[in-house]
Image: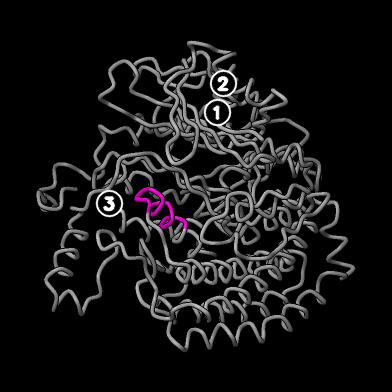
């Protein structure tokens, strides 16, 4: 029976200092790994017979403007379908040099999900076969889900609403 | 045209022996806004480049600026063939975040609504496969049944397609007696009509020859592409969120998860039909279970998050305070990150929510099933005929609103 404890133990045995910040928010094992280590962790989780995380559930990015030097987080969520267990791991990267290795060689799923993360957050997935915008127009020169872009045009005064705080 | 275009033509497009065909974005054979630039050798497809994003509405950005209860209408517009499932999925995500316990009756009422919308979703998808193979009758016929389902939604929440059904913590009002009568009526007439629909297609020679062996995908590839829902189960993998990660009391129900073998169009069709029968089975069980529970319960007792009844707001001080706090976004939401997924009409619909304790989510990501499995489309249709590509597309149950998010 695979449990979060076993996975944590196997990961620390294999990667030691490179995996850290283990948490279990709402029952899902979450940890952080070094940016250049993401594919090794993913391969280990997928290929190890006893772990068997053969399904990439979700991949997305998050922008934390206050974390200097690691503003962008890429979040991977994997699943072991037989054991009905999900885990999540994150890598943090500098927003001025947001290079993260692509997972397209391991999971086809990540192709469009990485394009989406690139489109909205500007994460540069190194080695991606076709890293172009997926939702927005090609001519766009910014990454709209970053926190510095407000939802509405800020010059409008009729929408100034301190009480409801848009 | 010197401006850079958003269309990628392959190298050496001029003077080549193949034809480039632009299928979509608004082609009658693609049900929704899908564009595929096909490379054709006669009738055979050599390559396909799908373009998406035509109806992108930036829901993830909008959600970062809205209080939690105002995000429900955004989820309506993801998979609009089964909006109630999306609504409930969102409510359950927030309930998971605030660790709310729901009464059994609310969970079962949700199960009824979710299974009804699953039936509506599968009916549309399966009958549209019929349309694409040249049988319009089934489509017209089951739309009458879908109408009965929408009447139930209308009775429960007031709207039909984009339902905005329920609230965080339960339903906005109790189910009326008429709603239960309509559910009973539906359960009575539906099996007979569904049998007729199956008789029309299941062993139909033309339908079988058009769908068997078309658009197939192996289980291993499907997993690698992140397939979920009926499309994954058609390949033989019995991954169903309702049994793998039970939510909303699905563990109390006795139902089976139908699977296919080859993962082709015909298998997907059969899996969906079998799921419709399972849904009927679940609804019947739920209606029976509800009869034994207190009929006045329709929401959880979480006054910080559940909007009080309007009559109370005008007459009771406490209700007025809670109403004000909820509407102004003054209630405390715990910080944390939570992932919750539900078995949507076409796969695993997941909500990845990061809360920093503010009135809106810090980040909300929708795991949209058809966005993920649509990337397999070029691989599936490579080498097949153009008409098969159309059938394959409708059998994948692609919903443009969900792909574009």
Relative depth, front residue between B13 and B314: B314
In the image, residue A82 lies at what x, y percent? 69, 40
Indicate the chain on which mark 3 is placed.
Answer: B
Left or right of residue B147: residue B70: left
Q: Does residue B98 show up magenta in the picture?
A: yes
Indicate the chain on which mark 1 is placed.
Answer: A
Helix, strand or loop at mark 3: loop
User: In the rendered structure, are the residues bearing label 3 and label 1 in contact, judged by CB atoms less than 8 Å apart?
Assistant: no
- Between disc 3 and disc 1, the foreground one is 1
Helix, strand or loop at mark 2: helix
Q: Principal SS element in the magenta part? A: helix
Residue occupied by mark 2: A9
Relative depth, front residue between B216 and B298: B298
Which residue sits at x=43%, y=66%? B103
Q: Quadrant of residue B253?
A: bottom right
From mark 3 to mark 1, how far is it between C-alphas?
A: 37 Å
User: In the rendered structure, are the residues bearing label 3 and label 2 in contact, judged by CB atoms less than 8 Å apart?
Assistant: no
User: In the rendered structure, are the residues bearing label 2 and label 1 in contact, judged by CB atoms less than 8 Å apart?
Assistant: yes
């Amino acid at each position: 029976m695979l449990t979060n404890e076993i996975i944590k133990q196997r990961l620390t045995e294999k990667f030691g200092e490179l995996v850290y910040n283990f948490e279990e928010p709402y029952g899902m094992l979450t940890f952080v790994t070094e940016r250049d280590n993401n594919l090794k962790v993913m391969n280990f989780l997928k290929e190890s017979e006893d772990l068997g995380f053969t399904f990439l559930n979700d991949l997305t990015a998050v922008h934390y403007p206050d974390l200097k030097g690691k503003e962008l987080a890429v979040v991977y969520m994997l699943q072991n379908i037989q054991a009905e267990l999900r885990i999540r791991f994150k890598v943090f990267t500098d927003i001025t040099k947001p290079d993260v290795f692509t997972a397209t060689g391991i999971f086809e799923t990540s192709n469009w999900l990485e394009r989406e993360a690139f489109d909205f957050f500007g994460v540069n997935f190194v080695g991606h076969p076709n890293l172009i915008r997926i939702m927005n127009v090609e001519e766009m020169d910014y990454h709209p889900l970053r926190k510095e872009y407000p939802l509405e045009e800020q010059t409008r005064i009729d929408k100034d609403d301190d009480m409801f705080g848009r | 045209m010197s401006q850079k275009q958003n269309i990628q033509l392959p190298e050496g497009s001029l003077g080549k022996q193949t034809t480039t065909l632009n299928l979509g974005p608004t082609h009658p054979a693609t049900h929704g806004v899908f564009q595929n630039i096909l490379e054709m050798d006669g009738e055979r497809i050599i390559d396909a480049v799908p373009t998406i994003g035509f109806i992108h509405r930036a829901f993830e950005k909008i959600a970062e600026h809205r209080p939690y209860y105002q995000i429900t209408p955004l989820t309506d517009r993801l998979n609009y063939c089964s909006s109630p499932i999306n609504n409930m999925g969102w409510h359950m995500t927030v309930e998971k975040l605030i660790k709310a316990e729901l009464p059994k009756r609310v969970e079962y009422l949700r199960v009824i609504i979710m299974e009804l919308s699953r039936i509506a979703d599968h009916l549309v998808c399966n009958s549209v496969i019929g349309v694409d193979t040249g049988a319009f009758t089934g489509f017209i016929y089951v739309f009458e049944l879908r109408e009965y389902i929408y009447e139930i939604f209308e009775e429960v929440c007031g709207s039909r397609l984009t339902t905005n059904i329920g609230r965080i913590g339960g339903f906005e009002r109790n189910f009326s007696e008429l709603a239960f009568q309509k559910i009973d009526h539906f359960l009575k007439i539906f099996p007979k009509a569904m049998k007729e629909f199956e008789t029309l297609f299941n062993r139909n020679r033309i339908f079988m020859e058009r769908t068997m062996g078309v658009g197939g995908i192996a289980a291993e590839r499907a997993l690698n592409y992140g397939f979920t829902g009926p499309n994954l189960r058609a390949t033989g993998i019995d991954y169903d969120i309702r049994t793998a990660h039970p939510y909303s009391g699905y563990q109390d129900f006795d139902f089976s998860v139908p699977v296919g073998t080859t993962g082709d169009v015909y298998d997907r069709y059969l899996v969906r039909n079998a799921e419709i029968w399972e849904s009927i089975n679940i609804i019947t069980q739920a209606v029976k279970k509800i009869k034994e529970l207190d009929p006045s319960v329709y929401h959880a007792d979480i006054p910080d998050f559940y909007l009080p009844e309007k009559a109370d707001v005008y007459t009771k001080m406490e209700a007025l305070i809670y109403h004000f706090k909820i509407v102004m976004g003054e209630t405390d939401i715990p910080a944390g990150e939570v992932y919750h997924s539900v078995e949507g009409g076409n796969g695993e619909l997941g909500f990845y929510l990061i809360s920093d304790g503010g009135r809106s989510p810090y980040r909300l990501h929708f795991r949209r099933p058809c966005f993920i499995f649509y990337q397999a489309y070029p691989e599936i249709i490579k080498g097949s005929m153009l008409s098969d590509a159309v059938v394959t597309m409708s059998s994948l149950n692609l919903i443009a609103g969900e792909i574009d998010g």
